[in-house]
Image: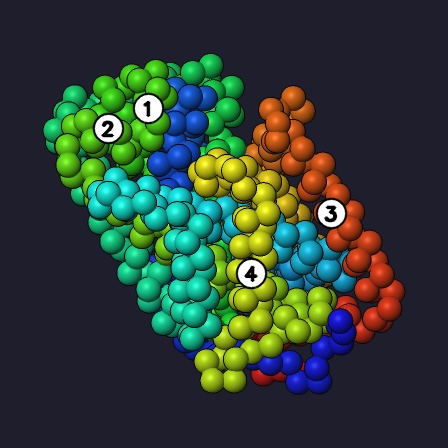
């Protein structure tokens, strides 16, 4: 397949999205309901009663990372996001390597969301309607629906993702308030460092999972080309999304601990703490949390397909990957080829590796494996910012924004990455570091070959700037 970029690269439809669209779609992609349902017990197991402090610490770390993407987006907003930014800092070999490595991680993590969409929906339908619909059928239906919506227009699909998120948010917050009112006994122990199990060690044990709850916060940068005033709106969306989701998680964590009477052992014994607690204290109203789970996954699937397919699209458009991925729908102005590729590979991975497994089990395994490349790319992008700004915009270089904060962002990612690759993990998690390493080596060899064959590739990285005409 040819990787030569056309003389006039295709453009996405500019000016489609305002700040509200971008923030809502980003928050939808994070899937706060599903992320919190399955993630908080792990955080509490490590950090103890003061688990909300771990979430706040993770929010601060994500804000360091948001600063890096915001600064890059002010200089050179691009649908290529991480790939473009790493290429600007470290050159074409690093850019092509990042493209392959990151897209692998995103598609694998996407297959996890696809799996849990079918699994959670099937469980909800069976529980409340008594119907047994195979999760595979619901998964396929979700793929088709999301594929059609995302191809037909970014504003249309973003509106649906936003609607799903607002339903999810209303349910989570209302039930959280109800739990606080019904149980009572409020105090500030969850925010007192003295209640961290093992002190800093307890914070560290819960910190990697707390970081992973935020994944998706970065999607605003990938929607730059379709945003109004991307140099201004993308940075605002990045910070707004990170702060909003951090505060939401902190509130839900506090409500959960209050509801369990600050008994971390009882919390960890629950299968899905927030759901089980609601069923115990509020009875039948728990059906709303199952509904929030469905809307959460649906909105997340739309958001991640919209945003993460843009990296594949831009890599094809600029010739880092085969240019077939750079095709744009003539009527709707959407990257239909990259969307189709993203969804079809995610579906194929699911049906290849999830056979005989519970979808929720596959969700945990695939999401963990896919997160390794994403977390590594987070860290490398932080290192790329000071290099890029010092070399190309030295007159505006800030030691705070372009050096210290990116350095803190890089350091903040060491613990989560180590948590994913540390030796001695149970099967199959012990294999994932080797899978990631193998993909990284293949990505580098592909990049080395590509750059050797195409001396002009460096000029094309980031050549399609979101708010400028194609050169």
Dot 4 corresponds to which residue?
344
Dot 3 corresponds to which residue?
440
Seen in the picture, residue 372 relative to 462 is either above or below; the reply is above
| Disc 3 element | helix
* Residue 143 image point, x, y percent: 45, 60
Q: Mark 2 and 1 residues: CB-CB less than 8 Å, in contact?
A: yes
* Residue 192 image point, x, y percent: 34, 22
Mark found first going from the N terminus, 2 or 1: 1
| Disc 4 element | helix
Number of the front mark, 3 or 1? 1
Q: Disc number at residue 357?
A: none
Number of the front mark, 4 or 2? 4
Seen in the picture, residue 455 relative to 203 is either above or below; the reply is below
| Disc 1 element | loop
> CA–CA distance between discs 4 and 3?
22 Å
Q: Residues within 10 Å of mark 2 (few under 14, many from 20)?
A: some
Q: 372 or 116: nearer the eye?
A: 116
Number of the front mark, 1 or 4? 4
Dot 1 corresponds to which residue?
270
């Amino acid at each position: 397949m040819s990787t030569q970029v056309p003389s006039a690269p295709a453009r996405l439809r500019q000016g489609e999205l305002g700040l509200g669209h971008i923030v809502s779609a980003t928050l939808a992609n994070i899937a706060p309901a599903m992320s919190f349902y399955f993630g908080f017990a792990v955080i509490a197991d490590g950090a103890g009663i003061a688990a909300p402090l771990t979430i706040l610490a993770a929010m601060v770390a994500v804000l360091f990372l948001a600063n890096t993407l915001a600064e890059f987006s002010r200089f050179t907003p691009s649908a290529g996001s991480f790939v473009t930014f790493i290429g600007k800092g470290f050159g074409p070999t690093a850019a092509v390597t990042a493209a392959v490595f990151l897209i692998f991680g995103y598609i694998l993590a996407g297959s996890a969301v696809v799996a849990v969409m079918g699994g959670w929906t099937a469980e909800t339908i069976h529980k409340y309607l008594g119907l047994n619909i195979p999760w595979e059928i619901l998964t396929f239906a979700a793929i088709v629906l999301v594929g059609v919506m995302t191809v037909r227009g970014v504003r249309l699909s973003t509106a649906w993702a936003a609607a799903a998120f607002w339903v999810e948010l209303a349910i989570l917050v209302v039930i959280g308030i109800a739990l606080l009112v019904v149980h009572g006994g409020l105090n500030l122990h969850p925010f007192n460092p003295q209640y961290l199990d093992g002190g800093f060690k307890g914070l560290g044990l819960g910190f990697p999972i707390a970081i992973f709850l935020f994944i998706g916060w970065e999607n605003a940068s990938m929607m730059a080309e379709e945003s109004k005033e991307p140099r201004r709106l993308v940075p605002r969306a990045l910070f707004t999304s990170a702060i909003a989701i951090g505060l939401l998680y902190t509130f839900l964590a506090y409500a959960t601990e209050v509801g369990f009477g600050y008994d971390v052992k009882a919390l960890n014994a629950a299968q899905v703490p927030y759901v089980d607690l609601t069923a115990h204290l509020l009875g039948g109203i728990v059906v709303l949390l199952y509904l929030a789970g469905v809307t959460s996954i649906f909105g997340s699937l739309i958001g991640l397909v919209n945003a993460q397919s843009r990296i594949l699209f831009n890599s094809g458009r600029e010739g880092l990957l085969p240019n077939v991925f750079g095709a744009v729908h003539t009527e709707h102005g959407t990257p239909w080829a990259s969307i189709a590729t993203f969804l079809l590979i995610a579906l194929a991975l699911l049906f290849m590796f999830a056979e005989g497994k519970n979808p929720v089990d596959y969700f945990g395994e695939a999401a963990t494996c896919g997160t390794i490349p994403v977390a590594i790319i987070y860290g490398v992008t932080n290192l790329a910012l000071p290099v890029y700004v010092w070399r190309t915009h030295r007159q505006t270089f800030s030691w705070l924004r372009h050096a210290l904060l990116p350095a803190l962002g890089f350091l903040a990612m060491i613990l989560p990455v180590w948590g994913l690759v540390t030796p001695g993990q149970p099967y199959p998690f012990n294999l994932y570091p080797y899978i990631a390493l193998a993909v990284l080596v293949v990505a580098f060899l592909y990049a080395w070959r590509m750059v050797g064959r195409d001396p002009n590739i460096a000029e094309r990285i980031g050549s399609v700037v979101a708010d400028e005409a194609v050169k």
